[in-house]
Image (cartoon, grey):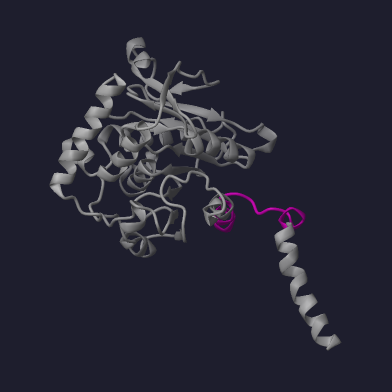
Amino acid sequence: MKELITALIIMIIFTASAFAQEVKYIEAPKFDGEFYLYGEPDKADVEFEQWYEIEGRGQFVRNVKVPTLIPYLPQPENSNGAAIIIAPGGAFLHHTFGSGGYEAAEWFRSQGFAAFILKYRVEETPRGEEDYQAYIAEKMAGYRAGGLSWNYAPATPDYAFEDVNAAVKLIRERAQEFHIKPGKIGIVGFSAGALMAVYNAESAPDECKADFIASIYGQLVMREMPDKLPPMFAAMSSDDELSGQSGFEIIQAWQKRGIVELHLYGQGGHNFGMGHEPFTNYLWPTEFMAWLRMLGIINAQSPSKRLSCSNLVYLISPLVINLAGWCM
């Protein structure tokens, strides 16, 4: 376990910087339809998790012992037949439930997906805030002394890997209930969650393997890979202090084993969630949708829906240029 967590030094730096801001602990939210991955748990384990808010950054949860799926389901008549499992980031120390959690789930539901936030198990940490910050500081000091390389490939803890695999299998088994097709289940992972998505694609048994994945600002360091891989969509910022510096070996390897699409945005840093202006990373959700339509995972939009204002500009511009030429 020490080796697994050591590999996440940079993610831990982000965690520590978040806790440098004001933290407000809150009651655990209640989610309609939330269900356990492994049957009814011990009540004490459920109550062990800690929820808190950081101003301007949304909600977080740590000390998760009991993995669950939180469903965001469209009306059956609006379903596109596909499911998205959302794996939040947080260095396997906590979950970031803001843009890479609630916002993502709401957006995917609005597009007709059966969306599920995966609250997977994370490392057990000191319960007191001061003790937790001291714990993180001690980790950071040890990691810096070790001189880890940017190109060190982080490993997904076994328990998190088990949870994402179990989530895929469970949703596939209940596909009819959720009005989806069992061969159209994807994972959209953010940061640490992106590592889980990639490991699922590379290593999960067939019954637990997603049909497509999205790695959103996850490291793309080369590892041992099978001969065949499901389609992968990857998005990150070139100035990302973590993932933008880790290279793209995995993209080149994926090209030989499956379908891969990489979107490298000029700016935006790490942890941009669903994206935000003025950076162009806010485009990735719609580009991801276009990619899924290209693959036939979801149906193409009708021409009337595709004709947006921006598309109209592209259609009209050549006519304007030609008319200008004729008038000269």
| Residue positioned 83% across, 81% down in the render | 323
Residue 207 seen in the figure: yes
Start-end of magenta stretch: 289-307
Left/right of residue 301 with respect to residue 250 in the rendered view: right
In which quadrant of the rendered image does the N terminus lie?
A: top left
Residue at far right of view: 327
Residue 320, horizontal then vertical, whole percent: 79, 76
Give the camera-side residue of 195 and 185: 195
Q: Is the residue 328 above or below the residue 171 in the image?
A: below
Q: Toward which corner of the image does residue 283 lie, by quadrant?
A: bottom right
Give the camera-side residue of 296 and 10: 10
Residue 238, horizontal then vertical, whole percent: 41, 59
Left/right of residue 135 with respect to residue 176 in the rendered view: left
Residue 198, horizontal then vertical, whole percent: 36, 48
| Residue positioned 36% across, 22% down in the render | 66
Residue at far top of view: 43
Residue 166 seen in the figure: no
Q: Is the residue 323 above or below the residue 257 in the image?
A: below
In which quadrant of the rendered image does the C terminus lie?
A: bottom right
| Residue positioned 23% across, 34% down in the render | 137
Left/right of residue 148 with respect to residue 46 in the rendered view: left
